[in-house]
Amino acid sequence: MEKGLKNVSFTILLLKMCIIFGQETVAQKGIVIDVGHGGKDSGAIGINEVKEKDVVLSIALEMLRLNDHLEQPLEIYLTRYSDTFISLSDRTKLAKALKADLFVSLHCNHAKDPDARGIEVYVSKVTSQFVRDAIWMAFELQAAFKEKLGFESRGVKFADFQVLRETNGQRPSVLLELGFLSNLDEHAYLSNNRSSIAIAQVILMTIMKY
């Protein structure tokens, strides 16, 4: 696969999103997008001091903006809407209070090896009635990022992250590592505003399939 990440036609992606919605006849599900880190917790700090907390917030806000322009928008809630610190337990409590149907946690990766690249999607390693749907969503996300945006896939993995552990018993939950801020190419892509739009669209398109 080519090293460079793809530029996409945002108009075409948005049109596809509208077509999918036009085929939907049931009530839309409630989605909680967990915007990783925030406030005093910057998360990973990459090349040129780009902070994980800022990248994922930009993407999440683009998801809201795009969703608001759809004819039949999803019910999307963010765990934070600005650069504020929200504890992990409060993030999972929000999903429970809202009785969300899906929980997606957004993050960026970092590694000592500057050549490390690609996306990872995590699901809880604890078995529950929702794990199968979570695994399906994880594979759909990694496939969409590879096909639409040219990201390499590092696979679907299992972990005991708190946000996955505490939401796993009530709904499908996934944690998405969107690429490496320590990688020159992926840092440049993730810190670009147009890329935030493209990533937001791909996540929305994938969620619509659920």
Image (cartoon, rainbow, N blue to C red):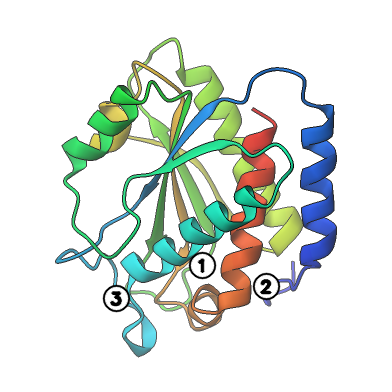
User: Label 3: which residue?
Assistant: 45
Nearest to the observer: residue 164 or residue 25: 25
Distance CA(mark 3)–CA(mark 2) = 21 Å
Q: Quadrant of residue 33?
A: top left
Mark 2 vs mark 1: give the one in front: 2
Secondary structure under badge 2? Answer: loop
Name the amino acid, label 3: Ile
Residue 91: x and y in percent read 26, 39
Tag of residue 5: 2
> Please, is residue 124 above or below residue 192 in the view?
above
Image quadrant holding the C terminus, namely top right
Name the amino acid, label 1: Arg
Q: Residue at x 28, y 32 (%)?
A: 94
Asked if residue 50 lies left or right of residue 197, the reply is left
Is residue 142 at least partly visible in the picture? yes
- Mark 2 or mark 1: name the one nearer the start of the chain: 2
Residue 153: x and y in percent read 59, 53
Secondary structure under badge 3? Answer: loop
User: Label 1: which residue?
Assistant: 117
Name the amino acid, label 2: Leu
Q: Residue at x 46, y 69 (%)?
A: 116
